[in-house]
Amino acid sequence: MNHMTKDIEQYLQTKFGNSLEDSNERQLYQALMAETRNRLSKKRYDYTKKLKESGQKQAYYMSMEFLVGRTLRNNLFNLGIEDEVRSFLAEKNFDLDRIYDMEPDPGLGNGGLGRLASCYLDALTSNDYPVTGFSILYEFGIFKQVIANGWQQEYPDNWLGMGQYGLVHRSDEEIEIKFYGKTEEHWTNEGLKVNYEDYKSIIAEPYDLMISGYKSEAVNVLRLWKSKANAGFDMKLFERGEYARSSESEAIAESISKLLYPADDNNEGKALRIKQQYFFTSASLQQIVKNHYKTYGSLDNLADKAAIHINDTHPSMCIPEMMRILMDDYNYSWEKAWEITIKVFAYTNHTIMAEALEKWSVDLFAPILPRIYTIIREINNRFCQYCNEIGAASDLESMSIIHNNMIRMANLCIVGSYNVNGVSGLHTDILKADTFEAFNRIYPGKFNNVTNGIAHRRWLGQANPELTNYLNGLLGGDFIKDLSNIEELLKYADDKTVLADLEKIKYTKKEQLAKYIKDANGINVDINSIFDVQVKRLHEYKRQLLNALHIVYLYRQIKFNGLRPRPRTFIFAAKASSGYVMAKNIIKFICTLSDMIEADPLVRNYIKVVFLEDYRVTLAEIIIPGANVSEQISQAGKEASGTGNMKLMLNGALTIGTLDGANVEIHDAVGDDNMFLFGLKTPEVNDLYAKGYRPRDYYERVPEIKETLDFMRTINVDGTRFDNLVDYLINQDPYMCLADFESYVNKQKEVEEAYGDKDRWNRMSLVNIAKSGIFSADRATQEYTDGIWHIARAGR
Ligand SMILES: *Cc1c(COP(=O)(O)O)cnc(C)c1O
């Protein structure tokens, strides 16, 4: 520890010519970021030496998104030096929390998928597994959301300004990536050769973010590729007088790592997205293969040493790119290259929604990646041939990789990898029985499930130190290393003192959240009210609108029908994809409810609505520990897993939810008595669609729905009306808010009753915390390491 303080003082002296006393917070922030990074680099040196000696197999996690969250607190916590650094700074009158607040979230992801990737890197590192993450160094991560008059506005998130100090620039490992141009095949003595000409050349520059583990030996890295022009290549073109072409490459290079697409559901800027996907998968694979070849002088044993994971279809070009490298750069035959490829890759599917399954038009794709396209075509030809041979030709309508001139990336992943997993029991069942039913028949055993998990050291240990310290005292600290030990807490389910202590801790976290709300939105909330939380991306299938309809219902009942409910604070936070008009209208509607209630001297005594702007990991860490109720109300069959549900449960919130995604497994763990299930189940949803869903029938038949929607038409705070939302619900309602309305409202009454019985509520909350062990990312990643990748802990 002496070391760290000395290192910080040294940094301030050499960088700024300052003593610690003369430094400002900005300088101290930089010193802490840089010295923490250096400390991890040094630790990594020993760790990689050990890995080289053991020569063991490693995993590589490819993901277009990593929602990292702040790193400084995580790293100090993991290194076990947070308390010392805090008190050392306090002696000099610096507040560590203010320094933490200077760090931007590296927002290299949109939502759950990106956060999952980061939770997995954290967990794998804490358990000493050798894994490297690969993604793009987006100059602008997920946009910063500002709410102005209830409307979402997007501002660029220039995170590198203050975020750069955590990165290690590895200019020694740059890689060339080629786009456009044309290929020519010709036969030589050594077989078929492919010439690739007139391409545009881009350079991928690596930047490494150190990933620390909790009291672990491992320090892994997240390698982020930044694009830049290939100066040497461009100079040659320039000298040949091809000015236009040399500046074209530069323009492509500039755009590729510029920004993350602010959509987690569908694709915009398709051509650029194709380039981004190829850019980072090609750079990553070239690096993996090069290192392997350097060590072993052969690629024959690649699959013995490397498991490469494809997180959703965004990195699916890994498969043809591996074929290209093996054949074009290392002279492998097609057959031998394919044998290696399908032993290396495993794929996780994250969605069953048709509009979110990636497809690229051949006309768009082929000119950008001519060689990759010919390889995909050949993979498909051979796959179709195989299906013909085994009598599965009639299923090619759904299984063919290229269909109606579109390339279906999920199909490519299924054909080109040895394992496909879904992310919750229900989701995997739907994949097998429905979405990929034909594939499941021809590839028995290829599909399996790994229910998602969360990094409990961040979501409990760091976000809720009060609860962590308490459980530490009560249970001993074992649950921090292994969350399944938290089940010991069940012993205290009827212990009045423990229940009262837990209630006190929740109260403290609610106070902290209330202070944040007051500072951010100027709204005073009642700490004793039920804190009812729905935080996640704004998407129609997640049904923030159903939650809002319940609020409208309550408003009307309080104002006109004498209802006097137990006070409740409805807390929302959500970003909407920038082009998603309906989602933005829903945000405006929720903000309007907030204003309308604040202006009503009667209603505001009972309910409040708060919409917190700019949902991100750091905000989640503030909101989740203060929640009493966790809203997980997606239409059944639509949420692949959810991980927000797990974070809230771990912090003692009770779930009101549909039987969807991992809610099913939460229900299995805690039982009916400890959660609030409502609504249609997946088969009932499907039946209702098949029968022809008519939301108007519900509007006409259920008086509460009619009254609520009719009243909604009159809502108007600043001239904005919501007839469009009402009409949409009555005429379309694609996610069946009206069909589930009654069941939801009734279940909410049960929530309120249960909260009124303090002992019962606290006991339920305790059971939820105690049963959350299975949702640790340690458990989930163990299923990947043992069941899919077959890798061991470092040095074993
Ligand atoms: C956990 C998390 C999510 C995922 O939330 P769901 O409720 O599972 O959709 C999204 N964004 C952030 C910032 C998160 O921390």
Image: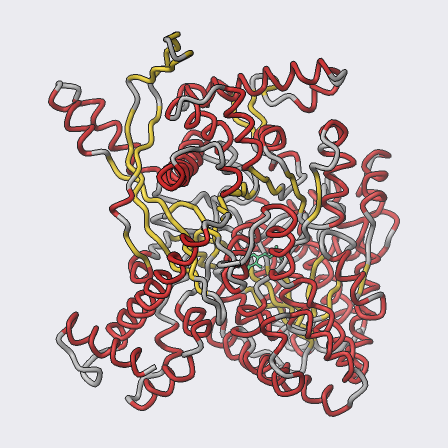
How many numbered marks appear?
0
Front-lying residue, 164 or 550? 164
Question: Which quarter holds ligand 1?
Answer: bottom right
Q: Quadrant of residue 673?
A: bottom right
Q: Is residue 154 visible?
A: no
Name the spot of residue 550 as percent of width and height, x first.
73, 61
Q: Height in image: 332 above or below 59?
A: above
Query: Does residue 609 appear to the left or right of 753 in the view shown?
Result: left
Q: Is residue 358 visible?
A: yes
- Residue shown at the point (37%, 25%) measured from the top left: 329
Name the spot of residue 324 as percent of width and height, x first.
43, 25
Name the spot of residue 138 as percent of width and height, x first.
37, 47
The quadrant of the image that shows the N terminus is bottom left
Query: Does residue 335 appear to the left or right of 428 in the view shown?
Result: left
Query: Does residue 463 appear to the left or right of 93 in the view shown?
Result: right
Front-lying residue, 693 or 771? 771
Q: Height in image: 145 above or below 692?
A: below
- Residue shown at the point (15%, 24%) measured from the top left: 236
Can you name the residue that lies furthest to the right here?
701
Q: Quadrant of residue 272?
A: top left
- Residue shown at the point (28%, 38%) measured from the top left: 254
